Image (cartoon, grey):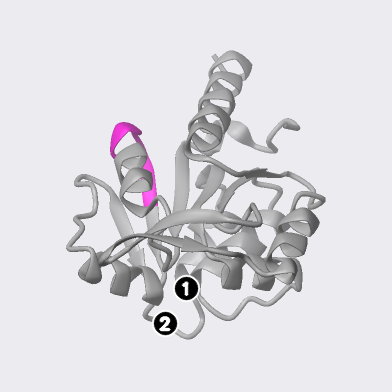
Amino acid sequence: MPPIPYAGTRSRLGWAITGSGHFFEESLEVIGLLKNVDLFVSKAAAEVIRMYKSRLPEGMRVYRDTTAASAPVGLFYEGVYHTLVIAPATSNTVAKFVFGISDNLVTNVFAQAGKCRVPIIVFACDTAPELETRAPGGIVKVWPRRIDLENVERLKGFEDTTVVESLDGLVAAIDERMRWLETSFS
């Protein structure tokens, strides 16, 4: 990834979660292993948290999608974040990213991170013609639509955006980013 402007002032990782059960609990576990994380929770993610009876990791700032203007996006202008992770990212969220729609907290932080040249890692849910995913009642099989798969491919072409397709890929991308930050600014 390219150098970060004013990287010395950016000490936090922003993480946005959307309303997908696909690797939702596992994403929360990864968040819990990291330091200096601010969490952006979409309205749909708040519902999933309740449906799955999940708990957010402790000790971090949590911004919920409660304002029409998505006020917390201003933190990107202030140089607070070195990286934005969006995991898991629903097909609806990916489609909004691809078509430039910023109508909720997560789509707004994505847009503002891009405008502020903050590198972004997206763990897209719908990445293969056939998937198994977790629903509240257990594991189910899903068949993402062609448009969902096409949008993931389009997102891969966005500048400063890394799209990962698995939990291992997510962990590896975050690890690579953190190592790059350590070696570049130590």
- For the residue pair 90 and 79, the one nearer the viewer reads as 90
**Mark 2 packing: few (<14 Cα in 10 Å), some, or many (20+)?**
few
| Residue at figure coordinates x 77%, y 54% from the top left | 153
Residue 94 placement (x, y as % from top left): 64, 65
Determine if the magenta segment contains residue 5.
no
| Residue at figure coordinates x 82%, y 50% from the top left | 157
Residue 75 vertical placement versus 93 (above, below)? above
Residue 37 vertical placement versus 131 (above, below)? above
Does 89 sit left or right of 149 as displayed? left
- For the residue pair 163 and 136, the one nearer the viewer reads as 136
Labels in figure, total: 2
Residue 162 vertical placement versus 176 (above, below)? below
- Kindly identify the amino acid type of the residue bearing the numbered disc 2: Thr
Marks 2 and 1 close (CB-CB < 8 Å):
yes
Residue 2 vertical placement versus 115 (above, below)? above
Residue 105 placement (x, y as % from top left): 49, 71
- Kindly identify the amino acid type of the residue bearing the numbered disc 1: Ala
Residue 148 placement (x, y as % from top left): 68, 66
Does 69 sit left or right of 164 as displayed? left
Question: Element at badge 2?
Answer: loop
Q: Which residues are magenta?
A: 32-38
Q: Which labelled disc corresponds to residue 67?
A: 2
| Residue at figure coordinates x 58%, y 24% from the top left | 176
Residue 135 placement (x, y as % from top left): 34, 64
The residue tagged 1 is 71
Q: Which quarter of the figure has residue 136?
A: bottom left
- Alpha carbons under labels 2 and 1: distance apart: 7 Å
**Mark 1 packing: few (<14 Cα in 10 Å), some, or many (20+)?**
some
Quadrant of the snapshot with the C terminus: top right
